[in-house]
């Protein structure tokens, strides 16, 4: 049961407050080398109609054969969503005519899906969280792709996508604003990427969302919903919800009623527009597919898959916080993407003392590495600084060999030129000065040259920072900051 809606989540209309109710249907392409019911390839970017079997093209007499890998991936996803796995499920024919559907029907699952109810805990930007219920996850075929911009008077059809396995993940109407919806999709995508069940690439169509939006007065029954189809960007999902909620509120406050319909989101204009009246289940004339037996597997099969699951984002986040003292925010950033978590763990593997330097390593991964990757427009897989190199830099700081300031210089050298950080420190004389007599000489000089500042520091101890800065500057950043602090406190009587 979710917490009551916060006042900040309500939309103020001309006649009072309104609450938004959102449910999402996520269509996630299953990571598999072959389609759901044929052996045709699933690679993205193939020439049109080159990855099509006779089954996909619905040639007469061709019979579908289930791809076990797709079933396995659906079960693993269900387990990652803490959902009930149904040991018996049925494939149905969803009948509708459209040019992108060669069979005249789509093989899907209706009353008996492979995965039942589950839930996902979604962390929100404000530090809170919301639990979103999962209604079901079922397997179905993707239709073909229609191309309307190739010829002036005709539409073309590419059957490469036709028959690719999709997992449709249907949420309960537990989402109450655009921010929650975007965070929910990001969390689902993260879970599936950790599992390796969907690559989540929205630009390539691997993850798409149908967004159901309705509005109501707080505490009243659900209103009439409209479904916004095929949104392929998390940002667009947020924009579509914001626009659609305000559109519906405007109609209701003018005394009108909401028509249940299917709408499209125009990303260029940032608005939704009507597509067709909303279909109901009976419009599709669902019935069990006579060419496919019920899908049955044992609990032992499910248990085996569960035992082999990788560590998922929530568990990894809790471990990072518990073992390395990371803040919830930092741990959340590191586990938001599989590649980020793997890079951080590779850095940890290269540390001499993980317990001591795990938090420092997280700071370097998040602030220095991610900051520089963003600045240069690079993905983490294209980072010029490897996990082993970053671990060496963090180790050098932890050992006291270099200061944080020198470490930033060293990071820049490795980023541009490459090389072993330990060798570079030796070759370029970057070692931190820990010789107290050498540091004391610099401290005495700074103190002797600034009698006015020395006179003020007793009344204003915060001025110690100025002296530290001067010593560090004079030593070229090589003096040990802790030794400088200790010496200055002694010399200045603090």
Image (cartoon, rainbow, N blue to C red):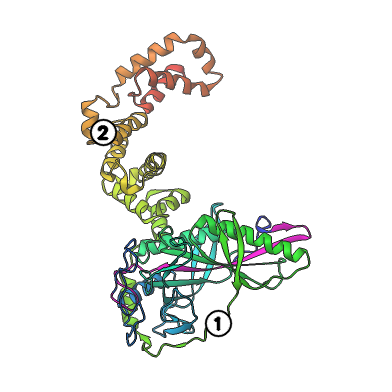
Give the quadrant of residue 481. top left
Q: For this view, does 294 lie left or right of residue 466?
A: left
Vertical relation: 250 (above or below) 75: above
For the residue labelled by badge 1, is the local secondary structure a helix, a strand or a loop?
helix
Crowding around mark 1 (Cα neighbors within 10 Å: few <14, some 14 to 19, many 20+) is few
Does the magenta portion include 38? yes
Relative depth, front residue between 378 and 443: 378
Residue that label 1 marks: 281
Relative depth, front residue between 216 and 395: 216
Of tags 1 and 2, the one toward the viewer is 1
Question: Looking at the image, which residue is at 44% across and 50% down?
Answer: 333
Coordinates of residue 63 in the picture (x, y in percent): 33, 85
Quadrant assignment for the N terminus: bottom right
In the rendered image, the residue lying farthest to the front is 153
| 1 and 2 marks in contact (CB < 8 Å) | no
The span picked out in magenta is 11-39
Vertical relation: 327 (above or below) 407: below
Q: For this view, does 97 lie left or right of residue 365?
A: right
How far is mark 1 from mark 2, CA to CA?
61 Å
Residue that label 2 marks: 417
Coordinates of residue 336 in the picture (x, y in percent): 42, 54
Coordinates of residue 28 in the picture (x, y in percent): 42, 67
For the residue labelled by badge 2, is the local secondary structure a helix, a strand or a loop?
helix
Vertical relation: 482 (above or below) 365: above
Looking at marks 1 and 2 on the same chain, the residue that comes earlier in the sequence is marked by: 1
Question: Looking at the rendered structure, which numbered label has been put on residue 337?
Answer: none
Does the magenta portion include 72? no
Q: For this view, does 307 lie left or right of residue 100?
A: left
């Amino acid at each position: 049961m979710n917490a009551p809606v916060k006042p900040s989540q309500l939309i103020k209309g001309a006649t009072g407050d309104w609450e938004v109710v959102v449910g999402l249907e996520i269509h996630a392409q299953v990571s598999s080398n072959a389609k759901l019911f044929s052996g045709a390839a699933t690679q993205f970017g193939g020439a049109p109609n080159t990855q099509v079997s006779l089954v996909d093209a619905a040639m007469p007499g061709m019979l579908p054969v289930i791809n076990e890998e797709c079933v396995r991936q659906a079960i693993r996803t269900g387990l990652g969503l803490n959902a009930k796995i149904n040991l018996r499920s049925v494939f149905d024919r969803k009948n509708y005519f459209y040019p992108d559907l060669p069979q005249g029907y789509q093989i899907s699952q209706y009353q008996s899906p492979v995965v039942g109810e589950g839930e996902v805990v979604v962390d929100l930007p404000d530090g809170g969280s919301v639990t979103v219920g999962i209604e079901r996850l079922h397997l179905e075929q993707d239709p073909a792709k229609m191309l309307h911009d190739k010829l002036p008077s005709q539409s073309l059809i590419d059957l490469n996508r036709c028959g690719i396995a999709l997992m449709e993940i249907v949420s309960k109407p537990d989402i109450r604003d655009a921010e929650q919806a975007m965070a929910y999709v990001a969390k689902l995508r993260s879970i599936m990427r950790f599992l390796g069940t969907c690559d989540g690439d929205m630009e390539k169509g691997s993850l798409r969302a149908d967004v159901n939006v309705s509005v109501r007065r707080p505490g009243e029954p659900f209103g009439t919903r409209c479904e916004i189809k095929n949104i392929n960007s998390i940002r667009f999902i947020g924009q579509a919800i914001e626009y659609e909620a305000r559109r519906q509120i405007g109609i209701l406050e003018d005394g009108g009623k909401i028509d249940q319909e299917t709408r499209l989101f125009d990303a260029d204009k940032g608005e939704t527009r009507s597509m067709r009246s909303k279909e109901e289940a009976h419009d599709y004339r669902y019935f069990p597919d006579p060419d496919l037996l019920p899908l049955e597997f044992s609990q032992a099969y499910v248990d085996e898959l569960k035992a082999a699951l990788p560590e998922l984002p929530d568990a990894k986040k809790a471990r990072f916080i518990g073992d390395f003292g990371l803040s919830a925010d930092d741990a959340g950033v590191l586990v938001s993407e599989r590649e980020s978590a793997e890079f951080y763990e590779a850095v940890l593997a290269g540390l001499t003392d993980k317990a001591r330097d795990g938090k420092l390593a997280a700071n370097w991964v998040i602030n220095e590495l991610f900051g520089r990757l963003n600045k240069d427009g690079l993905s983490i897989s294209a980072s010029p600084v490897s996990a082993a190199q970053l671990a060496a830099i963090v180790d050098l700081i932890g050992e006291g060999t270099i200061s944080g300031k020198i470490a930033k210089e060293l990071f820049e050298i490795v980023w541009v030129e490459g090389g072993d950080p330990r060798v570079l420190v030796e070759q370029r004389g970057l070692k931190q000065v820990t010789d107290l007599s050498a540091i004391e000489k610099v401290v005495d000089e700074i103190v002797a040259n600034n009698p006015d500042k020395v006179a003020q520091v007793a009344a204003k101890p915060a001025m110690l920072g100025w002296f530290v800065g001067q010593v560090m500057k004079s030593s070229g950043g090589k003096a040990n900051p802790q030794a400088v602090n200790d010496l200055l406190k002694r010399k200045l009587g603090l």
